[in-house]
Image (tube, grey):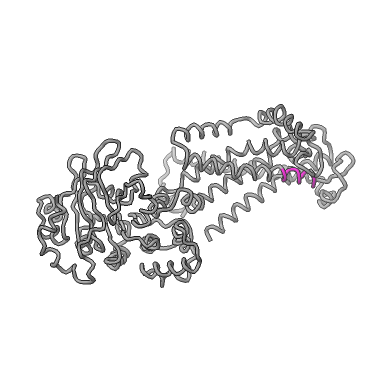
Amino acid sequence: MIWSKRNILFPLKLTDSLLQGILRAGAVISALVMLLISLFLVVESWPVLGQISPVRFFTDTSWHPLEGAYQLMPILAGTLYASVGALLLAIPLGIASALFIVYYASPRLAKWYKRLVELLVGIPSVVFGFWGLTTLVPLINQLHPPGASLLAAILVLTLMILPTITLTAYSALMAVPAEFLRNAIALGISRWGMIQGVALPAAKNGITAGIILAAARALGETMAVLMVAGNVVQYPETFFDPVRTLAANIALETAYAMGDHRAVLFVSGLLLMLLVMVLSGIAGLLEKQRHA
Amino acid sequence: MNSNQSTDKPNIFTLGPLEAGPACCDPQPAIQVRDLSLLYDGMIALDKVTLDIYQGCITALIGPSGCGKTSFLSAINRLTDLIPGCNVTGKILVHNQDIHHPDTHAQTLRRQVGMVFQKPTPFPLSIRRNLSLPLNEHGITQKAEIAAIIEQVLRDVGLWDEVHDRQDVSALSLSGGQQQRLCIARALALQPKILLMDEPCSALDPLASGVVEDLICRLRGRYTIVIVTHNLAQARRIANYAAFFWVSGRAGQLIEFGRCQHIFESPSHELTAAYVNGARG
């Protein structure tokens, strides 16, 4: 196929070959950056990976990196709790908002509502963190001290990933061919019946992609979470307990970390990246299953 | 108007090869359209159409593009409700029930009046789910009953032998002709009395088109069929009645309505004659 494409383009003009060069360079650079980052992470974490068995990240008594105790599990748990919690809240809310924009709101309202959501995407994470710290944390503190907690992290993350889920679900729903909807209505199917029977299944791929994007963002979000989560390394027993996430851990400790400690931080970075890779792997599998 | 012409000439009802077959063509009106006008944003698209569509017969709507055939069709199952700025005046009675009466629920109406569109549009679901979804929606949830209906309608459209052992594969894996027959089966599953078809064969290759055409003929008698077609030969082959629409200015008008044979062989209007003979349109 590539050959036939080339034949169509042949003979290449100067501008064509120039453009081809630029595009190729762009593609190579993007791929290279990804590879280099992975390589960098592996190289930097190598001193530890080569020396101490990775099992220790799960069996050490605690996270006291200065004393050589590298138990990562509570931090991993904190990361997963915060992200999963945020997803559990943001997925239904985001899909509901998208359905509202596409099928229920008047065109005027839909336009403004969508603009509002788009604005929400543009808010810098530090602003979310700031708001969480000054408004949300005191509120939660009144409910149950200390305030800086897993709950605060979940709520702030929810707000941050909600627009991603809403907008991707919106695009996916808008891409559902109008014929499907017309056919559904011609069969006397109600609006809700059409949405859950036809529109949502047809938009499933796009919505799933949005959720994965949001999950990746939630896992990696650093600043806002760091500002509201309390950052205590522990397994949270309730939503009101402070937690520390992998990303926050790196941000908190890189400044003074040296030697093995520094390398272990890179290991946690690697772990974070693996998590995201597993996620996109799952997305790929889902996709394949659908087309099987 | 023109709708009365057929009664002016009573002999028309007893003539022609198309009457052969079941006694489906007693001229009992299934749909009565009176002074139907359709406006899009105040622009008139269809101007005062009055005609009767007879029960159990195939009525073909013919005419050039943009003459309001599809608009007319969509008005019958109130699909026009969905078009912003579309305004329908006049009266349509489906089995003596005014479809614009406040007591007539659009969903109930659409269950009685099925529709098949030009482009085959199975939902991106399994074959089985395509057929069970509308059934579920109309309150039929018993598995055995649904399975029986699915088998029945798949047999009706001649798909049973082709797909009965793979009902759980995606309907999108079917060929174009099979997809269109599935769409017809989906409409039949709700046991409508009337089927509206908007150029059901025009997106299909000639072979698939022939299969669907035969299917439409087999449905004659059991269903009242209104079909829009640009294929005059097809209209002539399958229809009992034909309605000829023409566009004057921007408004579509019904020029002539009558027995198919009459429209094609001895039209009363010169525009009809010119159109069916290929001189215009």
Total numbered circles: 0
Picture residue at 68% right of the left edge, 42% below the top: A219
- Residue A88 position within the rendered picture, expressed as x and y whole percent measured from the top left: 65, 45
Residue A45: image quadrant is top right
Q: Is residue A5 magenta?
A: no
Picture residue at 66% right of the left edge, 28% below the top: A127
| Front residue of B205 and B59 | B59
Main SS class of the magenta portion in the image: helix
Answer above or below: position of B26 versus A44. Answer: below
Picture residue at 18% right of the left edge, 39% below the top: B249
**Left or right: B139 in relation to B68:** right
- Residue B278 position within the rendered picture, expressed as x and y whole percent measured from the top left: 15, 54
Span of residues in magenta: A73-81
| Front residue of A247 and B215 | B215
From this viewpoint, which residue is outermost toward the right? A67
**Left or right: B193 in relation to B162:** left
